[in-house]
């Protein structure tokens, strides 16, 4: 007969592709439950959650305070670094360098600086500030590019360039920048907490101790305080108080200690050099022998560590992407004001707050204690955190939507009227978060999942710094490549408006 | 002061102004009239680039910065007069002297809003007066305005135009109000299809002569004249 009517549009196609990818990835993923008795552990954890012990550690307040300190100083350093870089970001060299710096997770930066500065606060501040600075550079540059040029054109002739820039450009977009800094500060609190896992005096340090020793009441108390801290940011992080906090942070941060120049020199110009090259420079090795040794090393580490690590990282991240999509859909339905009673929406939004406040790393750590060291805890942790974050942003977005007069608060009406409106944004956010998921996936290696971070962590542990450096570079490159291709994919599928707004709301 | 010879301006590949010659002397009050899309704004923007540092320009697009306060938006007219350090200081902490100047200017323009209010909270008419205040605050000898009174009621528009005329020896303004052009300006230039179709002293003109240069119907022209 005539032409078949097609209902399979671009969004359906994108969703199907996403799920196909995730399912294929799941085939390769190691998702066994290894723990002997996960239910016993789970019930002990549940018991801990309902009986939190706020007086178990005397360091509770100090841990919270130091968590805020590191986040605050890290973000401040990031702004000082990224602000000026945003002005020259159009230069390909600057953009590429920033992308590489961003591609390495805070925790890896911390592992690197740990070798140089030891447990000095400098390690924590630099580990947060450096990748955040690189992110600020890109986002500020994108935001500045959005500012309209009409004002600049109408300014009096002979206005000096700086005033022209500040009043004509910055004036338009500084609220967007402030909003973004506020959002990044929340992220920095999470990063700061996680840095405790490698020895910084922040919340993660005490969390790890408590959970490893099975003291769930104490661990639950720490987590609850952390969620409260993040949930009430708008109440305690007032604009006027920021300088006071910054001064207090500088005052109360642990002593920086002495930086050993000789050690720094040795680390950069000896330890980081790969085998072969090191020999040629320092031990009169023949150039051909050196190159040969270097090649052997490069081939071995690439085949035995970098490639399997990258493969596992991508597999894990793709599986998590599919599950995040599912979690985002369900969480959005539960927490939406358009789908159920007001009380359910409030309860749902509270749940979203809890899930998005806990860093993926800590979620995965706890899940791993429960169900054993496979990829499963990591996948679930990523999906819960990112799905909840996306649902939270969607709930915020849909406040502007007024449903039709015949609307009923039911899942079917919801799917027709609300979901269809926010779906492009959901997909945009999901693909944007993929970059973040990939970064987080890598650090799960420190927890024992065989992603590339596992090999990096081992290299540091074995004091093979050249191996660590090479694997870090591979991680950075992987992130840059994925970021670039995800951006291309999203730019093709998602309308411009969403792609533009993305940098500001995520 | 201004001399344009055989000027042609294009917008994309469409010629907006064709072979136009116009000269304006210091002290003249010139109204430019014409139906919409005839090239008035393009011509005006070009005149501004010619006169640059002698003229204040109040564009139709206003160029207000929504996130900044009324004070800051007006103060932007004075950016060229001050050192950048002083401009930055005023951004963070407006100086009393400047606040007084801006406040005086705003009350002269019947703009009765708090100076620390952000421009995004203002109505269309208020925004237009902020843009006007910014142009006046440039304190130039020549004022170039592009329909600067379009969203104001006629009574207020007349008071404001008096302010503009008293503060600037030379005024070049695009207008969409026939009676205002005849009453307040010495010379009227009418554009049609990118060319000058009328250039005459306003004393010798009657509203009927200007009908072709406005979008409205005949009736409304005489209504305004009444």
Image: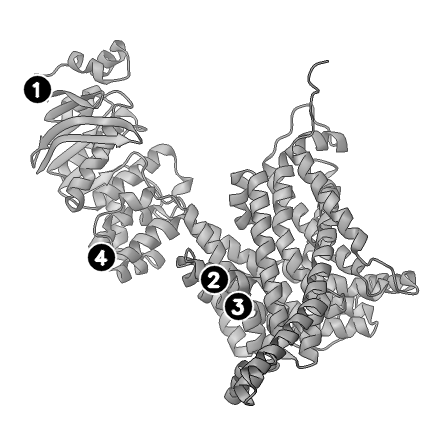
Q: Determine whether, in the image, residue B174 is placed left or right of residue A347.
A: left
Which disc number belongs to residue B203? 1
Please determine whether, in this image, residue A151 is positioned above or below residue A301: above
Please determine whether, in this image, residue A198 is positioned above or below residue B38: below
Residue that numbered label 2 is attached to = A240
Where residue A155 sits in the image (x, y, percent)? 26, 46
Residue that numbered label 3 is attached to = A130
Answer yes or no: is residue B115 visible.
yes
Q: In which chain is the residue bearing label 2? A: A
Tell me the element at label 1.
Answer: helix
Q: Determine whether, in the image, residue B2 is placed left or right of residue A232.
A: left
In contact (CB < 8 Å): disc 3 and disc 2: no
Where residue A391 sits in the image (x, y, percent)? 68, 46
Q: Determine whether, in the image, residue A440 is placed left or right of residue A33.
A: left
Q: Are marks 1 and 4 on the same chain?
A: yes
Task: State which mark lies toward you, 1 or 3.
Answer: 3
Colouring chosen for the image of the structure: one colour
Where residue A485 sits in the image (x, y, percent)? 58, 50
Q: Residues within 10 Å of mark 2 (few under 14, many from 20)?
A: few
The alpha-carbon separation of the residues under discs 1 and 4 comes to 42 Å
The alpha-carbon separation of the residues under discs 1 and 3 comes to 71 Å
The alpha-carbon separation of the residues under discs 3 and 2 comes to 25 Å
User: Where's the N terminus of chain A, which quadrant?
Assistant: top right
Task: State which mark lies toward you, 4 or 2.
Answer: 4
Q: In which chain is the residue bearing label 4? A: B
Residue that numbered label 4 is attached to = B82
The alpha-carbon separation of the residues under discs 4 and 3 comes to 37 Å
Q: Residues within 10 Å of mark 4 (few under 14, many from 20)?
A: few
Which residue is at a point 41% across and 62% down the rendered structure image?
A84
Q: Observer-nearest residue: A258 or B92?
A: A258
Which residue is at a point 74% across and 38% down the rendered structure image?
A341
């Amino acid at each position: 007969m005539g032409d078949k009517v097609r209902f399979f549009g671009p969004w359906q196609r994108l969703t199907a592709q996403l799920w196909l990818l995730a399912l294929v990835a799941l085939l390769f993923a190691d998702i066994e439950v290894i723990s002997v008795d996960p239910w016993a552990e789970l019930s002990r954890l549940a018991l801990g959650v309902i009986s939190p012990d706020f007086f178990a550690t005397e360091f509770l307040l100090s841990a919270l305070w130091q968590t805020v300190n590191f986040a605050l100083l890290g973000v401040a350093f990031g702004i000082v670094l990224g602000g000026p870089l945003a002005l020259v970001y159009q230069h390909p060299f600057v953009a590429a360098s920033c992308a590489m710096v961003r591609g390495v997770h805070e925790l890896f930066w911390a592992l690197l600086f740990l070798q140089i500065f030891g447990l000095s606060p400098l390690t924590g501040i630099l580990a947060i500030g450096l990748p955040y600075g690189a992110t600020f550079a890109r986002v500020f540059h994108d935001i500045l590019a959005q500012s309209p040029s009409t004002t600049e054109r109408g300014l009096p002739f002979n206005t000096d360039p700086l005033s022209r820039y500040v009043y004509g450009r910055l004036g338009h977009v500084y609220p967007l920048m402030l909003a973004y800094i506020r959002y990044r500060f929340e992220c920095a609190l999470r990063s700061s907490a996680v840095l405790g896992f490698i020895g910084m005096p922040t919340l993660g340090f005490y969390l790890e101790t408590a959970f490893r020793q099975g003291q769930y009441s104490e661990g639950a108390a720490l987590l609850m305080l952390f969620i409260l801290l993040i949930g009430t940011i708008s109440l305690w992080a007032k604009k006027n108080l920021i300088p006071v906090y910054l001064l207090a942070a500088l005052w109360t941060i642990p002593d920086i200690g002495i930086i050993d120049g000789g050690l720094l020199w040795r680390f950069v110009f000896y330890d980081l050099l790969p085998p072969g090259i090191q020999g040629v420079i320092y031990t009169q090795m023949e150039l051909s022998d050196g190159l040969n040794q270097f090649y052997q090393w490069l081939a071995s580490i690439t085949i035995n560590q970098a490639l399997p690590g990258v493969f596992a990282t991508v597999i894990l991240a793709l599986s998590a992407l599919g599950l995040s999509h599912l979690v985002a859909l369900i969480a959005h339905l539960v927490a939406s004001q358009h789908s159920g009673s007001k009380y359910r929406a409030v309860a749902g939004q509270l749940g979203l707050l809890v899930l998005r406040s806990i860093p993926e790393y800590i979620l995965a750590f706890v899940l791993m204690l429960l169900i054993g060291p496979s990829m499963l805890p990591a996948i679930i942790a990523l999906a819960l955190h990112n799905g909840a974050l996306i649902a939270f942003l969607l709930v915020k977005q849909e406040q502007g939507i007024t449903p039709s007069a015949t609307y009923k608060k039911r899942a079917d009406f919801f799917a027709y009227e609300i979901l269809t409106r926010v779906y492009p944004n959901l997909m945009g956010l999901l693909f944007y978060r993929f970059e973040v998921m990939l970064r987080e996936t890598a650090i799960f290696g420190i927890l024992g999942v065989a992603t590339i971070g596992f090999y990096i962590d081992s290299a540091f542990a074995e004091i093979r710094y050249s191996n660590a450096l090479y694997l870090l570079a591979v991680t950075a490159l992987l992130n840059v490549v994925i970021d670039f291709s995800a951006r291309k994919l999203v730019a093709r599928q998602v309308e411009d408006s969403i792609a533009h707004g993305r940098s500001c709301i995520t | 002061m201004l001399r344009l010879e055989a000027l042609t301006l294009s917008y994309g590949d469409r010629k907006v102004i064709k072979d136009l010659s116009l000269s304006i002397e210091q002290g003249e009050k010139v109204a430019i009239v014409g139906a919409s899309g005839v090239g008035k704004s393009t011509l005006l923007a070009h005149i501004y680039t010619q006169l640059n540092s002698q003229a204040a320009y109040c564009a139709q697009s206003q160029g207000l910065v929504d996130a900044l306060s009324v004070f800051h938006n007006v103060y932007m007219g004075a950016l060229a007069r001050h050192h950048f350090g002083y401009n930055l200081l005023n951004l963070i902490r407006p100086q009393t002297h400047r606040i007084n100047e801006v406040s005086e200017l705003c009350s002269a323009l019947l703009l009765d809003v708090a100076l620390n209010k952000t421009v995004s909270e203002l109505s269309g008419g208020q925004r237009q007066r902020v843009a006007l205040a910014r142009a006046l605050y440039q304190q130039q000898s020549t004022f170039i305005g592009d329909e600067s009174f379009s969203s104001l009621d006629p009574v207020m528009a007349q008071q404001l135009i008096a302010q503009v005329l008293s503060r600037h020896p030379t005024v070049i303004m695009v207008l969409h109000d026939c009676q205002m052009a005849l009453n307040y300006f010495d010379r009227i230039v009418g554009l049609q299809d990118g060319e000058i179709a009328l250039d005459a002293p306003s004393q010798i003109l009657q509203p009927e002569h200007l009908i072709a240069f406005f979008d409205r119907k005949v009736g409304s022209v005489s209504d305004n004249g009444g």
